[in-house]
Amino acid sequence: MKRLAILGASGHGKVIADGALLSGFDDVVFFDDAWPKLAENGRWQVVGDSAQLLSRCSEFDGVIVAIGNNSVRASKSIALMDAGAMLTTVVHPSAVISSFAVIGSGSFIAAGAVVQVDAVVGRFCIVNTNAVVEHDCTLGEAVHISPGAMLAGAVTVGDRSWVGIGACARQLVRIGSDVVVGAGAVVIRSISDSCTVVGNPARPLVR
């Protein structure tokens, strides 16, 4: 029996669990720091917290972190790797992944997503439902490309950046690290690190 442990009993965790069962895992269990108050995530059991998973990771054929916060997902994933966990990548069977693309460990590629030729998706990334990562794109660590977002060819996205739902980026632009691209934004020029942009064309958010 092929078993997967998911850290993070969230709605996103359910999506990963569903994709995992469709792609070859036989059993999924959750761990979450809200346990034991949180004992189930839909139809799946929550059996412990992150400390317990760190001590039990050898029991599982794969482990993945289902936490939306990019920085937290990265730090939890690294802690699991340091503890000897077999960090796995889950790819929904309806996703289209080029045989010439590279997908980093601990990443999740959701239903309907497309990752094209010579794209590189770093560790701990999320390429969410119906998102498109075109040819020659490079995603750093712990990037989240939200549902329906589209990156044209050769876009670079830095570590821990979040491209919001329905956003898009013109070819060849660079989106820095720790960037938030707002929902529906249209990125036509490069974005510096630690910036939030919104609108069409995307501009820095003025608070």
Image (cartoon, grey):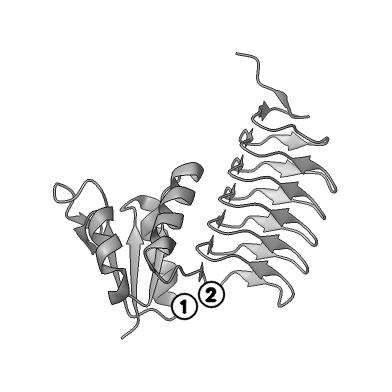
Q: Position of residue 46 (x, y in %)?
A: 21, 59
N-terminal of the pair, mark 2 or mark 1, is: 1
Whole-percent x, y for residue 176 in the image: 71, 38
Image quadrant assignment for residue 49: bottom left
- Looking at the image, which residue sits at the far front? 82
Residue at 82% from the left image edge and 44% from the top image edge? 170
Left or right? Give the position of 127 relative to 51.
right
Res. 165 image quadrant: top right
Which residue type carries mark 1? Ser
The residue that label 1 is drawn on is 23
User: Residue 86 occupies which quadrant of the picture?
Assistant: bottom left
Q: Looking at the rendered structure, which numbered label has been put on residue 172?
A: none
Q: Is residue 81 left or right of residue 57?
A: right
Q: Which residue is mark 2?
A: 93
Percent position of residue 164, x then y? 60, 40
Q: Identify the secondary structure beneath mark 2.
A: loop
In the picture, which quadrant includes the C terminus?
A: top right
Q: Secondary structure at mark 1?
A: loop
On screen, residue 131 versus residue 5, left or right, reads right
Q: How many marks?
A: 2
Determine the residue positioned at 79% across, 52% down. Answer: 152
Q: Residues within 10 Å of mark 1 (few under 14, many from 20)?
A: some
Q: Does any portion of residue 69 appear in the rendered image?
A: no
Q: Are marks 2 and 1 in contact (CB under 8 Å)?
A: yes
Q: CA distance from mark 2 to mark 1?
A: 6 Å
Image height check: is 12 above or below 115? above
Relative side of 102 to 58, left or right? right
Name above or below for residue 165 compared with residue 66: above
Q: In which quadrant is the N terminus drawn?
A: bottom left
Q: Residues within 10 Å of mark 2 (few under 14, many from 20)?
A: some
Is there any visible trace of residue 207 in the rendered image? yes
Q: Mark 2 belongs to which amino acid?
A: Pro
